[in-house]
Image (tube, rainbow, N blue to C red):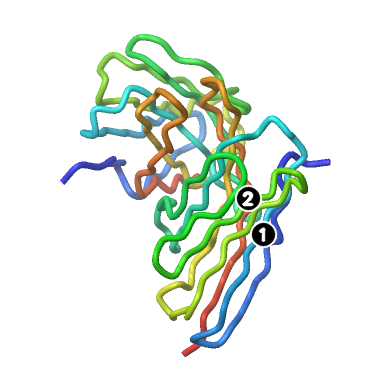
């Protein structure tokens, strides 16, 4: 079983739709969870950074972490064509380990 | 503006040649990282450094080398021993303590001539 599983898509939605992106993981020791957005030929850009379980909201973006199910989600409300990108989940351990483990990314297209 | 600068944006390597990718940051971050990204695969860690003059191998260090002589700089050399070097290389940095998130540069695409 891979450490982090992420559906690669592609996912295509109409403008204004609510988008749900998800990752599952196998290592219960992961405590820090991140979502990055990557446009074509660019580096990943940090969108959300959460610790342990719970929700975090930032504008149109909401990140959810369910540690009991080892499942994290990113919701995008009122999706825009500019949200079209690849979304990467990442996570790492508590206690000073700096290594990030990434999902393979989900490619999202928002159609005008 | 603060950020991470990678150069060049595109690089071509001949067979048997070593090439060096540059990564500079002005964020005063202690830790720096190199990742490789291939189509359909997640980012894979090549090397990382948490402090000047010290670095550790990541998951796929074979065929690569690094140095960390200055806090701001973490160059990556792709040696001739790396048999499949064509990829998108990403440099990142972080505050280095308390699991601060990593921030990325815009990458270098390396291709073989």
Q: What residue is shown at x 28% (from left), y 40% (from top)?
A: B4
In-image side of B65 versus B40 (left or right): left
Q: Is residue B113 visible?
A: no
Q: What residue is shown at x 55% (from left), y 87% (from top)?
A: A14
Q: Nearer the viewer, residue A68 or B29?
A: A68
**Within 10 Å of the Cα at label 2, are there few (<14), some (14-19), or many (20+) other Cα atoms?**
many
Q: Return the residue at label 2.
A: A65
Q: Nearer the viewer, residue A94 or B18?
A: A94
Q: What residue is shown at x 26% (from left), y 33% (from top)?
A: B24
Position of residue B52 measured from the top left corner of the image (x, y, whole percent):
32, 13
Position of residue B102 measured from the top left corner of the image (x, y, whole percent):
42, 38
Q: Which residue reaches farthest right?
A: A1
Q: Return the residue at label 1.
A: A22
In-image side of B40 versus A110 (left or right): right
Position of residue A60 measured from the top left corner of the image (x, y, whole percent):
44, 70
Q: Chain of mark 1?
A: A
Q: Quadrant of residue B62?
A: top right
Disc on the earlier residue, 2 or 1: 1
Q: Is residue B53 above or below residue B80?
A: above
Q: Is residue A16 above or below residue B70?
A: below
Q: Chain of mark 2?
A: A
Q: Is residue A96 above or below residue A23?
A: above
Q: What residue is shown at x 56% (from left), y 38% (from top)?
A: A32
Q: Nearer the viewer, residue B89 or A12?
A: A12
Q: Is residue B53 visible?
A: yes
Nearest to the eye among marks 2 and 1: give it.
2
Q: CA distance from mark 2 to mark 1?
A: 10 Å
Position of residue A10 measured from the top left corner of the image (x, y, whole percent):
65, 71
Q: Which residue reaches farthest left?
A: B1
The N terminus of chain A appears in which quarter of the rendering? Answer: top right
């Amino acid at each position: 079983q891979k450490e982090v599983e992420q559906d690669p898509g592609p996912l295509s939605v109409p403008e204004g739709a609510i988008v749900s992106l998800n990752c599952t993981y196998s290592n219960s020791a992961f405590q820090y969870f991140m979502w990055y957005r990557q446009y074509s030929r660019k580096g990943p850009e940090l969108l959300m950074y959460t610790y342990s379980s719970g929700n975090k909201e930032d504008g149109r973006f909401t990140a959810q972490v369910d540690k009991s199910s080892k499942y994290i989600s990113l919701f995008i409300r009122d999706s825009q064509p500019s949200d079209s990108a690849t979304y990467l989940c990442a996570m790492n351990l508590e206690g000073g380990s700096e290594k990030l483990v990434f999902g393979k990314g989900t490619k999202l297209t928002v159609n005008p | 503006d603060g950020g991470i600068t990678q150069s060049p944006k595109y690089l071509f390597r001949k067979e048997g040649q070593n090439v060096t990718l540059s990564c500079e940051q002005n964020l005063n971050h202690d830790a720096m990282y190199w990742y490789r990204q291939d189509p359909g695969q997640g980012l894979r860690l090549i090397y990382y450094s948490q402090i000047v003059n010290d670095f550790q191998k990541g998951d796929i260090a074979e065929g690569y080398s690094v140095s960390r002589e200055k806090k701001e700089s973490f160059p990556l050399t792709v040696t001739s021993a790396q048999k499949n070097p064509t990829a998108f290389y990403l440099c990142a940095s972080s505050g280095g303590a308390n699991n601060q998130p990593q921030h990325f540069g815009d990458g270098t695409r390396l291709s073989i001539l």
